[in-house]
Image (tube, rainbow, N blue to C red):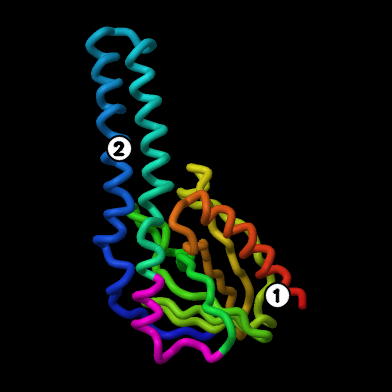
Amino acid sequence: MQGSAPEKPTVWTAKRRWMGNLLPMVLWLPPTLGGAFLALRSGEVFGWAIVLVAIGQVLGWLGVNWFGSALNHSMRAELALLKADRLPDIPGKGEFVGFATPRFRSALDPHEDVGLLYFMPDKLAYLGERYQLDIPRATVKKISRKPNIHTLLALGGWISIEGENAGKPFQVLLEPRERSTGVGNRREARKLLERLRAWHVN
């Protein structure tokens, strides 16, 4: 697997990561806190207290589904313009995905980078804002699903590509960002997994 050094992000910025978390929190927090306050004041867990808390969870989930992926189309366009001189000369526009290395950890978002994934006969090419990687098909040993925070919300999860190159093991983690909702990207994940597995065995 070959790759280039990370670049400073201008597309997948901290501000955009915060937006994907703060907007759902604005929907989740008021009814959840209101329900907790009502339960503490009245001493009753059931009734309006539990109704408010339940409403908060539903609104929070809807917020993550809507706002967590709302900027995908604009980010794809920005990235394609930014990397126009590096886009592979092959048919197709590439799959817009979130990307992470195994050691990456963040409280804001599981995606370390965003980029375009291209299928070629002998390799995968990932062109991200920070990372650029070529993954030869001969080096890939396993393609599987792995959980992340989106899995806990039933809104997605990783596609893991594992292998060995020059005697060194590697793993990259991908999650579709083609759609503007989490539910839409969860469906895209199934399609991308099937496409990757078909590419791997052909």
Q: Residue at x 31, y 28 (%)?
A: 32
Q: Which mark is residue 199?
A: 1
In this picture, which residue range is highlighted in magenta?
A: 76-89
Find residue 144 and report its horizontal and vertical position in percent.
65, 61
Asked if residue 62 is among those painted magenta in the image, a careful observer would answer no
Query: Considering only vertical position in the picture, is 53 above or below 190?
Result: above
Residue 29 in which image quadrant:
top left
Query: Considering only vertical position in the picture, is 196 above or below 137?
Result: above
Identify residue type, mark 1: Trp
Residue nearest the viewer, comparing 95 with 1 = 95
User: Along the horizontal axis of the image, is 15 left or right of 117?
Assistant: left
Asked if residue 85 is among those painted magenta in the image, a careful observer would answer yes
Q: Residue at x 32, y 80 (%)?
A: 7
Secondary element at tag 2: helix
Q: Residue at x 34, y 75 (%)?
A: 78
Q: Which residue is mark 2?
A: 27
Residue nearest the viewer, comparing 129 with 139 = 129
**Quarter of the image containing the N terminus?**
bottom right
Identify residue type, mark 2: Leu
The outermost residue toward the right is 202
**Quarter of the image containing the C terminus?**
bottom right
Mark 1: few/some/many CA within 10 Å (<14, 14-19, 20+): some
Secondary element at tag 1: helix
Which of the marked residues, 2 or 1, is nearer the chain's N terminus?
2
User: Along the horizontal axis of the image, is 1 left or right of 65?
Assistant: right
Pointers 2 and 1 in contact (C-beta within 8 Å)? no
Residue nearest the viewer, comparing 90 with 42 = 90
Q: Main secondary structure of the magenta part?
A: helix
Closest to the camera, between mark 2 and mark 1, is 2
Find residue 20 and report its horizontal and vertical position in percent.
33, 53
Query: Considering only vertical position in the picture, is 49 above or below 84?
Result: above
Find residue 116 and report its horizontal and vertical position in percent.
48, 75
